[in-house]
Amino acid sequence: MPISSNILKLKQKLKDLNWLPEGLTPQQQRLVWLGAGLLLLLVFYFVIVYPLMALQSSWDQDLERKRQLLVRYQTLRDSKGKVAQALQALKTTVGQMEGQFLAGDNPGVASADLQEILKNITGAHGVQMTSTKVLQARDAGSYQEVPVQVQLSGNVAQLLTVLYHLEHHKKLLFIPEMEINAPRWMATQRDQTQTLQVNLVVTGLIKKKGASA
């Protein structure tokens, strides 16, 4: 069957369906067909293409959120490892420090240990310990400070040696207070063999009972 015959039949069917108004010129018919084609394209875009594009955009956003969550998770996991290492290093440091505490788990035993340390150091360097006084223990977080007040008698070189050994002792010791009593005439003389009186407060540490490591 000739093609022109098919076109004529299609046009006749469209006329029968009133899709094409009668009396249109060929140019007007082309414009109608062009408008119908554009309308179909718009319908196709908004019904099929646009929803697919919106769905693709939603998928892309969801994937991006998941990627960001994965990056944050990876960062947290890496940070967790670093925090664990830092915590372990801190525990090791604290353990080493606590190994330098005074003997005993109460201020009474600890003060006796501190007095023994003072007695040994002063005796080894020719310094007289003329008096001792155990002071009230003080809380310091999970620890307690155990102070002992002593009065020492010796020359400058001896006292400096005692102070050095106290500050560098294997036990963790502090000297928060020190008072030196010297005769006035020594201010104009540089005789380091003259005897001085020194009052010291020496403090050590113990761990509180029940304190966590």
Image (spheres, rainbow, N blue to C red):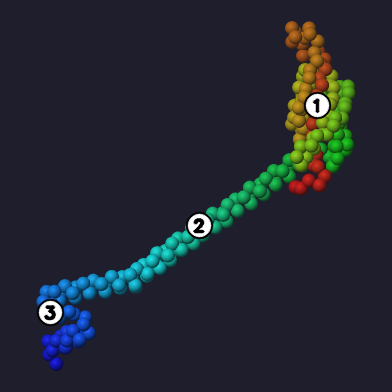
Element under disc 3: loop
Residue drawn at 83 percent across, 39 percent down? 103
Amino acid, disc 3: Gly
Q: Quadrant of residue 175?
A: top right
Residue drawn at 30 percent across, 73 percent down? 44
In the rendered view, would you say 14 is above or below 147? below
Residue drawn at 76 percent across, 42 percent down? 142
Of the residues tagged 1 and 2, which is closer to the observer?
A: 2
Residue, disc 3:
23
Q: Which is nearer the eye, 83 or 180?
A: 83
Q: Is residue 175 visible?
A: yes
Residue, disc 2:
71
**Closer to the N terminus: mark 2 or mark 3?**
3
Q: Which mark is residue 185?
A: none
Of the residues tagged 2 and 3, which is closer to the observer?
A: 3
Residue, disc 1:
201
